[in-house]
């Protein structure tokens, strides 16, 4: 085999490997980071689909909603898993309810508009007397997905700040 053919074969091999790795990254075949993601859903605390913020008590009701699209990339899955991890103590103690909802679903359109949800995000809400009195769309979650410990600290700090304003 002459040099030109050998170089062509090597370059084509490089292109094929590069494309394969790119597809693997986009589809999530290849995992990034050293730590595995925790389970994304806990059956005891998660509702899926339609957002139901239907408390009629006069006491404040706090809810964390992870909004996602029907197709989720690896980063979106991290946002859900890391948020759930960060809020797990508050969820378990009953301080906050956890919900998961598709922001592209027509039945969630009114809340998506109200909370200004444009992409996967976490929204913290406070409800009193059956009415949402305040909310925080935590869009900054995207800025912390590169480091799980940093994300958990950020989300806990955000939750504590939201809760302190009751």
Image: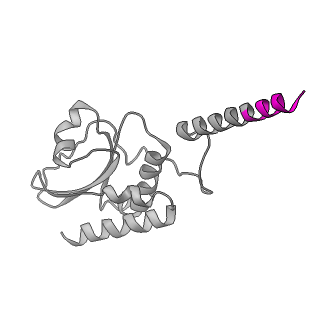
Q: Residue 124 in magenta?
A: no
Query: Where does the magenta region start and end?
Result: 1-11
Query: Would you place residue 48 above or below residue 157 in this image?
Result: above
**On the picture, is 126 further left or further right than 58?**
right
Q: Residue 8 in magenta?
A: yes
Indicate the quadrant where residue 8 lies: top right
Q: Position of residue 63 (x, y in %)?
A: 26, 54
Indicate the quadrant where residue 102 lies: top left
- Which quadrant would the C terminus be assigned to in this image? bottom left
Q: Nearer the viewer, residue 122 or 39?
A: 122
Which residue sits at x=38%, y=33%? Answer: 70
Which residue sits at x=15%, y=61%? Answer: 59
Indicate the quadrant where residue 12 lies: top right
Q: Position of residue 74 (x, y in %)?
A: 50, 44
- How many marks the image carries: the answer is 0
- Which quadrant would the N terminus be assigned to in this image? top right
Which residue sits at x=24%, y=72%? Answer: 164
Q: Nearer the viewer, residue 48 or 22?
A: 22
Q: Is residue 41 visible?
A: no
Which secondary structure type mostly characterizes the magenta part of the structure? Answer: helix
Which residue sits at x=32%, y=66%? Answer: 158
């Amino acid at each position: 085999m002459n040099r030109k053919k050998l170089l062509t074969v090597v370059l084509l091999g490089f292109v094929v490997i590069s494309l394969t790795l790119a597809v693997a990254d986009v589809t999530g075949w290849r995992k990034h980071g050293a730590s595995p993601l925790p389970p994304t859903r806990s059956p005891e605390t998660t509702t899926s689909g339609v957002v139901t913020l239907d408390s009629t008590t006069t006491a404040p009701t706090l809810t964390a909603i992870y909004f996602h699209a029907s197709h989720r990339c690896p980063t979106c899955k991290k946002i859900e898993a890391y948020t759930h991890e960060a809020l797990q103590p508050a969820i378990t103690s009953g301080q906050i309810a956890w919900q998961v909802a598709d922001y592209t679903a027509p039945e969630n359109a009114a809340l998506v508009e109200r909370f200004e949800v444009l992409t996967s995000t976490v929204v913290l809400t406070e409800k009193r007397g059956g009415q949402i009195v305040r909310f925080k769309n935590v869009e900054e979650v995207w800025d912390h997905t590169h480091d799980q410990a940093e994300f958990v600290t950020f989300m806990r700090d955000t939750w504590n700040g939201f809760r302190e304003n009751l």
